[in-house]
């Protein structure tokens, strides 16, 4: 007999099973103390007719059970009840039949404390799992959008410029040991591949700029990227990342500091009425943003080494990518001489840079090849150059592409360019391809890059979008 057992109270949150072999019952407010035999009797057999009994109970949070040895033996001998207890996995404490009410209450409180701790842990685990699921879902959704957009607009291994603050008259001077520059970026860091800033004047050869992408709150987006200023002339300089950044889109701040002798001067952009995008120099805000350009690519994709064409890379045998944007401007070679420039092409021809595609468009002719020239590209022991080519108009006739390299300033007319071109590669409408040229005798110094196209159709087409996209240069090692 259980002394002091009470009927269940309204609003009880937990159920404690109590064996009939115990002399006393714990006094616990808000806890439904349920005798073992009553719990078994309240269970419903949910097995199909002819199957062994299978018990189930209404939803109840059982924090544990206080049994005597006799109660435990009785439960073990009831196969259906034992199976239900095993399924619910509540803890069982074996007590002496003469255990006092205080001792039983203490054991009951310990069961409740363990249950509460388990609930807290489960809740934390569920919150962590939900946060991880939400993060993965957002990354998947964001990556899907980026992949879709990248594939739709590009369909080629190229990088797209996101936004640019153009360089203007104002500038900022940085010295070693100073706090440096803090600039809020006008675009999301998701799929970010590189960041350019504009060097206003030459710096010391031992100078170095370091970029850190910082969050408003929390850890940095990526490891700091350092760029040496040795031999760098004024113009855009690039901070490339090892991989295209991925993850949920987020706002970021570019923190740039200088290390080395003397100082470095970076260009600022036009005055901005939006204070959030004004640069902070050593903690003081200026009314101008920093002149910068951002580039994005396929999230998580590894980035090849990049080369700025006005600086000769080391002849280390590495292949470095050059964006079309960095080779700009392009000029079209005249057919004959300067006074007869473009004379004789009876149809539309051009050689332009397409900013939206980050590519050069050399529109072909059905009469004879059209050649665009990119002058004064710096190389050191150049052994190979290649470009991704693309006939972007789905209604264009087939177009032949060719690539060539000549010593700087030696090619002035179309006829001279033809001797420097590699064999032609023909693409059908919408196709991609590559064209490359190799050199048994490495080239050094300044060279001119020749981009040639020729229409394979018989009728003139004013929309034969013949594009030269990203370029790759391999320099060295020098033979011998």
Image (spheres, rainbow, N blue to C red):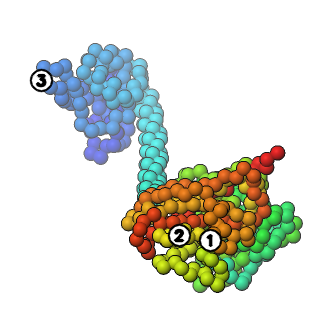
Cβ–Cβ below 8 Å for labels 2 and 1?
yes
In the depicted structure, whether residue 56 falls above or below residue 175 = above
Q: Which residue is labeled 1 in the image?
A: 414
Whether residue 153 appears in this view of the structure is no
Q: Quadrant of the N terminus?
A: top left
Dot 1 falls on a residue whose secondary structure is helix
Measure the C-alpha gap from mark 1 to mark 3.
94 Å
Instruction: Give the quadrant of the C terminus.
Output: top right
Q: Nearer the viewer, mark 2 or mark 3?
A: 2
Q: Earlier in the sequence, mark 2 or mark 1?
A: 2
Q: Residue furthest left?
A: 49
Within 10 Å of disc 1 (Cα), the crowding (few <14, some 14-19, many 20+) is many
Tell me if 107 is positioned left or right of 267 in this view: left
CA neighbours of label 3 inside 10 A, class few (<14), some (14 to 19), many (20+): few
Between residues 443 and 7, which one lies in front from this camera angle?
Answer: 443
User: In this rendering, is residue 13 above or below 240?
Assistant: above
The residue under the point 25% across, 29% down is 39
Alpha carbons under labels 2 and 3: distance apart:
90 Å
Within-10-Å neighbours for mark 2: few <14, some 14–19, many 20+: few
């Amino acid at each position: 007999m259980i002394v002091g057992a009470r009927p269940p109270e309204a609003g009880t949150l937990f159920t404690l099973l109590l064996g009939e072999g115990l002399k006393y019952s714990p006094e616990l407010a808000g806890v439904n103390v349920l005798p073992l035999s009553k719990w078994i009797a309240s269970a419903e057999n949910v097995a199909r007719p002819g199957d062994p009994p299978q018990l189930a109970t209404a939803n109840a949070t059982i924090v544990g059970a206080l049994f005597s040895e006799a109660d435990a033996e009785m439960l073990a001998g009831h196969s259906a009840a034992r199976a239900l207890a095993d399924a619910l996995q509540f803890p069982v404490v074996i007590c002496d039949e003469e255990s006092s009410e205080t001792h039983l209450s203490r054991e009951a409180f310990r069961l409740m404390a363990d249950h509460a701790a388990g609930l807290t842990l489960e809740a934390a685990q569920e919150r962590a799992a939900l946060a991880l699921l939400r993060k993965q879902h957002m990354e998947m959704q964001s990556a899907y959008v980026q992949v879709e957009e990248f594939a739709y607009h590009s369909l080629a291994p190229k990088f797209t410029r996101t936004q640019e603050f153009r360089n203007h008259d104002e500038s900022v001077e940085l010295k070693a040991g100073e706090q440096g520059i803090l600039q809020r970026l006008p675009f999301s860091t998701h799929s970010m591949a590189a960041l350019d800033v504009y060097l206003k004047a030459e710096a010391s050869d031992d100078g170095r700029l370091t970029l850190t992408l910082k969050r408003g709150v929390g850890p940095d987006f990526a490891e700091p990227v350092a760029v040496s200023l040795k031999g760098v002339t004024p113009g855009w300089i690039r901070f490339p990342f090892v991989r295209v950044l991925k993850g949920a889109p987020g706002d970021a701040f570019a923190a740039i500091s200088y290390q080395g002798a003397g100082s470095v001067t970076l260009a600022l952009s036009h005055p901005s009425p939006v204070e959030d995008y004004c640069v902070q120099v050593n903690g003081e805000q200026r009314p101008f943003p920093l002149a910068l350009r951002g580039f994005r690519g396929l999230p998580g994709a590894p980035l090849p080494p990049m080369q700025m064409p006005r600086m000769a890379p080391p002849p280390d045998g590495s292949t470095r990518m050059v964006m079309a944007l960095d080779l700009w401007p392009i000029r079209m070679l005249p057919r004959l001489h300067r006074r007869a420039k473009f004379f004789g092409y009876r149809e539309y021809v051009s050689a332009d840079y397409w900013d939206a595609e980050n590519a050069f468009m050399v529109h072909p002719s059905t009469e004879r090849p059209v050649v665009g020239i990119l002058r004064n590209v710096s190389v050191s022991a150049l052994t190979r150059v290649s470009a991704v080519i693309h006939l972007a108009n789905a209604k264009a006739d087939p177009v032949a592409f060719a690539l060539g390299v000549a010593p700087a300033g030696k090619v002035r007319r179309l006829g001279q360019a033809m001797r420097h071109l590699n064999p032609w590669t023909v693409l059908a409408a919408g196709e991609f391809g590559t064209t490359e040229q190799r050199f048994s005798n490495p080239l050094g110094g300044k060279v001119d890059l020749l981009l040639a196209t020729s229409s394979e159709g018989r009728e003139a087409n004013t929309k034969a979008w013949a594009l030269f996209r990203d370029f790759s240069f391999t320099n060295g090692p020098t033979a011998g």
